[in-house]
Image: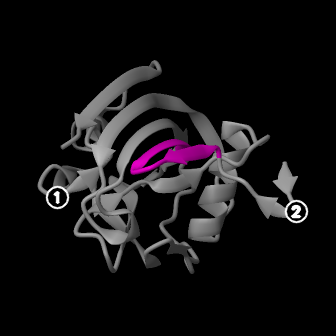
Amino acid sequence: MYLNDEKINCRYDRGDDRFSYRVGAIIIEDGAALLATNDSADYYYSIGGGVHFGETSRDAVLREVKEETGVDYEIDRLAFVHENFFTEKCGMHKGKRFHELSLYYLMKPRGTRVIDSDSYCSDGREYLEWVPLEKIKSLKVFPDFYAEKLGNLPKDVQALVSRDVD
């Protein structure tokens, strides 16, 4: 759904508080997960982004993956529902308190790590990197459950809550 031809993310702001509905893609090829970072971030984060008003989460994750990787991936299954409470520590949203609801989809492997990324986010250029699963625990990665869960994905959907609020 669009307002004046503008795509509207499912989120709202009230002062320094933001509620956000988003999707994330878990893309694993040959023992490595595809993660993103940008010039303002000192951490890695999942591929994904906001769900547009009137868009299903499945359509949103397929759109976000295509936008960020340049590749059409297929969805394997829903893996995690994550409710995340945090205060942004860098970038244009520094100091803003978030209540974020995210659905993380496991994508089907393609058998290749070749992507065609030309992705940008609100903080500028995004860089995508294949990070070996065993290395994720030693890096600063969000969502925080990635370090524990990506190396041993559950068979059923898990609901998770994270709190990192000042």
Give coordinates of residue 62: x percent, y percent. Answer: 67, 51
Residue at the image position 51 percent from the left and 64 percent from the top: 112
Residue at the image position 53 percent from the left and 54 percent from the top: 48
Q: Callout 1, which amino acid?
A: Leu
Which mark is on residue 156? none
Give coordinates of residue 119: x percent, y percent. Answer: 55, 75
The magenta stretch is 10-23
Which mark is on residue 4? 2
Q: Nearer the viewer, residue 4 or 53?
A: 4
Instruction: Determine the secondary structure under disc 1.
Output: loop
Residue topped by disc 1: 139
Chief SS of the magenta region: strand
Position of residue 9 relative to residue 131, above or below, is above
Please, which colouring scheme is shown?
Answer: one colour
| Residue ranking furthest to the top | 156
Q: Nearer the viewer, residue 16 or 11?
A: 16
Query: Which circle, 2 or 1, is nearer the viewer?
Result: 2
